[in-house]
Image: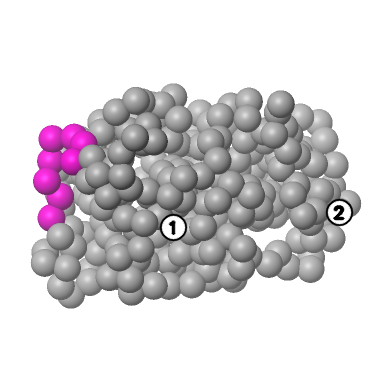
Amino acid sequence: MSNFVNDGHTTPEAFVQHIKSLGHYDFPDPALVDPDGIGIVAIGGDLASETLISAYAQGLFPWFNDDEPIAWWCPEPRCVMQPTNYEPSKSLRKQANRARWQLTLNQAFDEVIHACSLPRSNGVDDDLNESQLDGEHTWIHDEMIEAYNELHAQGFAHSVEVWDDKGALVGGLYGLKIGGIYFGESMFHIASNASKLAFWGLMRLCAQSKVTLVDCQLPNEHLMSLGAITLPRTDFLTQLDTLISNDSNKWHKNSHKPLAVSLLGNLQPWQLNL
């Protein structure tokens, strides 16, 4: 992990260049190879941690079925959320106030990503980037699960979990954090509104941690209803260097205490483990 982290002795510009140069591949400029804004900019490569970090730092992410070659995407436009602008619905606030559920950070990453990989039997797409390709399976297959578990072990991929009053995992989400940006990947629920509570918890955690933008990748009705907006791809990529070079609070498995969902409306709901 030391190869990926700014040690405080390099300039932001040098750190960004270093992050982008990780791995063995030179990703193309999306504007040059995808002038029509279809979204796909490269095919091939691997899912090594260095490759993934380099790709995300350049605004790309992998999205492909398990019987297809690795495809790298940079959508036009880009769906994003500013954590400080997020406002939960009145009905969600009421549910949070009544529920005896808890949120945790990084306590069940593998369980969350596996749950996100399962078919959506209720027909509701909870994915941050509309990952349900054909209604029978998701794009989160074994190769992706292994790669993101490795990123989690290295401190880049993070999960937010929702637990009910009996201690069962009923919802959650996962993604990557690099500097001041969180790249959302997917979320799930098996209890009503559990993924929305996880998303609210993520917004509060980002706001407290100096994470100023959440990348939702592709717009969908669910995300737009939560307050997401779209940016032209060029605007998103222009901001990216500054975002990944910004310092933010570290998220570890034991960095934050469990959070009762009834406290999400508080000014600083997430508390550090001291």
**Which residue in the protein does label 1 denote?**
215
SS under mark 1: strand
Q: Is residue 47 rendered to the left or right of residue 252?
A: left
Residue shown at 88%/51% (left/top)?
98
Residue 57 position, x and y percent, is 30, 48
C-alpha gap between disc 1 and disc 2: 28 Å
**Reading the chain from its start, which is encountered first: label 1 or label 2?**
2
Q: Which residue sits at x=51%, y=64%?
A: 81
Q: In the displayed image of the protein, which residue is found farthest to the front?
A: 9
Residue type of the residue flagged with mark 1: Asp
Q: Residues within 10 Å of mark 2 (few under 14, many from 20)?
A: some
* Left or right of 83, for residue 241: left
Residue type of the residue flagged with mark 2: Asn
Along the viewing direction, whichever of 249 and 167 lies nearer the viewer: 249
Which structural element holds mark 2? helix
Residue 117 belongs to the span the image colors magenta: no
Compared with residue 139, is residue 150 higher up or lower down, i.e. above or below? above
Q: Which residues are magenta?
A: 21-28
Report the quarter where the C terminus lies.
top right
In the rendered image, the vertical position of residue 40 relative to residue 136, given as above or below: below
Quick check: can you spot residue 165? yes
28 left or right, relative to 259: left
Q: Nearer the viewer, residue 245 or 52?
A: 245
In percent of the image, x 32 and y 55: which residue is there? 241
Image location of residue 207, percent across then percent down: 61, 54
> Dot 1: within a 10 Å radius of its alpha carbon, few (fewer than 14), some, or many (20 or more) residues?
many
Protein image colouring: one colour
Q: Mainly helix, strand or loop, the magenta region?
A: loop
Dividing the picture into quarters, in which one does residue 95 lie? bottom right
Q: Position of residue 8 (x, y in %)?
A: 39, 36
For disc 2, the marked residue is 97
